[in-house]
């Protein structure tokens, strides 16, 4: 039986978490989940999308350097 390495679990999570940030940022542009000032939602949504893109880029470069 093959041992499960923690890096095999964390590698997909390195890409899943930034995607969740981007999805949450996009949800802030709609009126589905959150009920506060529209300008604050747009600013916070943009920040979340940019942070998610940054984290995705960092995960990509980390996995590219490892391989």
Image (spheres, helix red, strand yellow):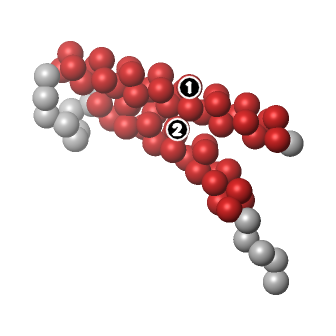
Q: Quadrant of residue 9?
A: bottom right
Q: Are marks 1 and 2 in contact (CB under 8 Å)?
A: yes
Q: How crowded is the residue under tag 2: few (<14 C-alpha within 10 Å), some, or many (20+)? A: many
Instruction: Name the image quarter holding the C terminus.
Output: top right
Q: For numbered disc 1, what is the local secondary structure? A: helix
Residue farthest toward the right in the current orientation of the protein: 67
Instruction: Name the image quarter holding the N terminus.
Output: bottom right
Residue farthest toward the left in the current orientation of the protein: 36
Residue 45 percent across, percent down from the top left: 34, 25
The relative height of residue 35 versus residue 41 in the rendered view (above or below) is below
- Residue underneath mark 1: 54
Number of numbered callouts drawn:
2
Looking at marks 1 and 2 on the same chain, the residue that comes earlier in the sequence is marked by: 2
Residue 16 percent across, percent down from the top left: 55, 47
Q: For numbered disc 2, what is the local secondary structure? A: helix
Is 12 left or right of 4, judged from the image as shown? left
The relative height of residue 50 versus residue 3 in the rendered view (above or below) is above
Q: Nearer the viewer, residue 53 or 38?
A: 53
Residue 38 percent across, percent down from the top left: 18, 20
Q: Nearer the viewer, residue 5 or 51?
A: 5
- Residue underneath mark 2: 18
Q: Which mark is residue 62?
A: none
Residue farthest toward the bottom in the current orientation of the protein: 1
Residue at 21%, 33% (x, y): give it: 31
Residue 64 percent across, percent down from the top left: 80, 36
The relative height of residue 39 versus residue 20 in the rendered view (above or below) is above
Q: Quadrant of residue 14?
A: top right
- Disc 1 to disc 2, how far (Cα)? 8 Å
Is 3 left or right of 39, judged from the image as shown? right
Residue at 71%, 59% (x, y): give it: 8
Q: How crowded is the residue under tag 1: few (<14 C-alpha within 10 Å), some, or many (20+)? A: few
Is 59 left or right of 28, judged from the image as shown? right
């Amino acid at each position: 039986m093959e041992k499960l390495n923690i890096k095999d679990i964390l590698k997909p999570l390195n890409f899943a978490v930034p995607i969740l940030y981007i999805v949450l940022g996009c949800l802030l542009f709609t009126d589905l989940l959150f009920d506060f000032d529209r300008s604050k939602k747009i600013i916070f949504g943009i920040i979340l999308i940019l942070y998610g893109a940054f984290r995705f880029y960092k995960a990509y470069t980390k996995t590219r350097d490892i391989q």
